[in-house]
Amino acid sequence: MSAITFPEGFIWGTATAAYQIEGATRADGRGVSIWDTFSHTPGKVQDGHTGDVACDHYHRYAQDVALMADLGIRTYRFSVSWPRVQPDGHGAVNPAGLGFYDRLVDTLLDAGIDPMVTLYHWDLPQALEDQGGWPSRDTAYRFADYAQLVYERLGDRVTTWTTHNEPWCAAFLGYASGIHAPGRTEPGAAFAAVHHLLLGHGLAVQALREAGAQRLSIVLNPAAVAGTGPGSEAGVRLMDGLQNRIFLDPLLRGEYPEDVLEVIRRFSDLSYLQEGDLEIISRPLDLLGINYYSPSLVGPGTGPGSRSHPGTEGIELLPPQGPVTAMGWQIEPAALTALLKRIATDYPGVPLMITENGAAFNDVRTGDRVHDADRIAYLEGHIRAAHQAITEGVDLRGYLVWSLLDNFEWAEGYHKRFGLIRVEYDTQERILKDSALWYREVIKRNGLV
Ligand code: IFM
């Protein structure tokens, strides 16, 4: 393996999300989110795990920031919990809730770490879901109001703002297959949710830009979709439409692709799409975040498609071909290079950042060590793939590992460990895994030896 060095100023960091690490779900006036409701509903999350305590980051953030500083992490991407800031999703701020993020940002800056804020990582206030959730247009306006409140408080210190994390998951896992909160299985509503997530993004971008925000972004999880034989092209195009172009085209071209609209019309009359919406949605962005873990494979035959992709009935989705992580996700770094190149080519002009990449493995603790060679190999392969994309001309600005800490992996509960740092959930002890020590060297050298 050859040594590689990244461009000067390349950003190295880690990412987390509020509901996955904070715990303290009833502290200081926090309201109820859809994930509180969902995780407390029997049968929704493996073994009934909830985010009630998680990594107790709400109380231990100073220790976690110190660990990041020790690893040399330059950027920390975290999300703000909407129901901590506005318990019912509208109206006055809950000062104690917003105060937590104030302290977190100051602690990060004191440690020399750049805070990168995600405004929505799936924890919608339950009160807004009770009024219709993301399929309701009003939620987009509530989101923009909330974004402004957070910006007013943190905007003097936070330069990079992300509206949504993986709106595909929020819409389709939440409202089509229902494997995520709020657990609804209404494909038409899922497409309305897509549109209102995008509209909320555009309204927030507009408001934050006017308020003086420096760097505005959204984070997507585009599918690195490939076909495996003659006849698979139509399936590839459909999957690409329903996970990638359905977001990328409105955001960066100001239109929905016609083939995607055709699929949507099978589930919805599109009455939610109003004049002027696409103009708002396509306000210029400063950065596009890409979360990548694994490729999606489409076969040449027919199959049931996927419940999370309404409209794919008849498409043959293939199981992983080759080595997988503990999530069962195929390990294929080359697909990351291809994905970055494709986005840079088809949607030029927006700098990219890998805002999540990482892997769950069945880590074993040996004394005070976790020898997670499999995670190091995964990260190394993907960092090389990212470098290859830069070599081939992609304007890639940074790489953030998912995740800083082992945490609540949504419907999988605490069974899947993605962290560079192991968390013992019964004692809240933190242990740096070998991958954390290895990543410290990557950051120090700005590359791989
Ligand atoms: O844990 C999630 C995260 O919340 C969003 N992106 C994928 C990660 C791993 O599944």
Image (tube, helix red, strand yellow):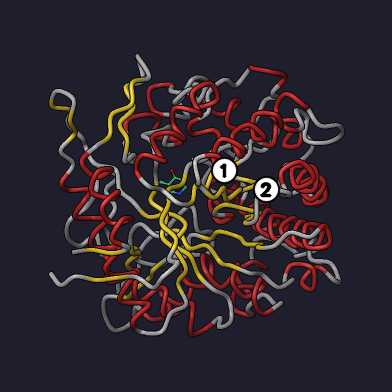
The reply, left or right, for residue 316 in relation to residue 186 is: left
Q: Earlier in the sequence, mark 2 or mark 1?
A: 1
Depth check, front residue: 108 or 182: 108
Q: Is residue 180 visible?
A: no
The residue that mark 2 highlights is 157
Marks 2 & 1, CB-CB < 8 Å contact:
yes
Q: Is residue 390 above or below residue 269?
A: below
Crowdedness near tag 2: few (<14), some (14–19) or many (≥20) residues, C-alpha within 10 Å: some
The residue that mark 1 highlights is 109
Q: Is residue 225 above or below residue 373?
A: below
Query: Amino acid type of disc 1?
Result: Leu
Mark 1 secondary-structure assignment: helix
- Which residue: 75% across, 47% down? 151
Query: Amino acid type of disc 2?
Result: Arg
Label total for image: 2
The N terminus - image quarter? bottom left
Q: Is residue 8 above or below residue 431?
A: below
Depth check, front residue: 144 or 313: 144
- Which residue: 23% across, 55% down? 378
Mark 2 secondary-structure assignment: loop
| Quadrant of the image occupied by residue 102 | top right
Crowdedness near tag 1: few (<14), some (14–19) or many (≥20) residues, C-alpha within 10 Å: some
Distance between the Cα atoms at labels 2 and 1? 8 Å
For the residue with label 2, is its CB less than 8 Å from the closest atom of ligand 1?
Answer: no
The reply, left or right, for residue 236 in relation to residue 123 is: left
- Which residue: 58% across, 48% down? 170
Q: Position of residue 337 (x, y in %)?
A: 34, 74
Mark sitting on residue 443 = none
Q: Position of residue 115 (x, y in %)?
A: 57, 47
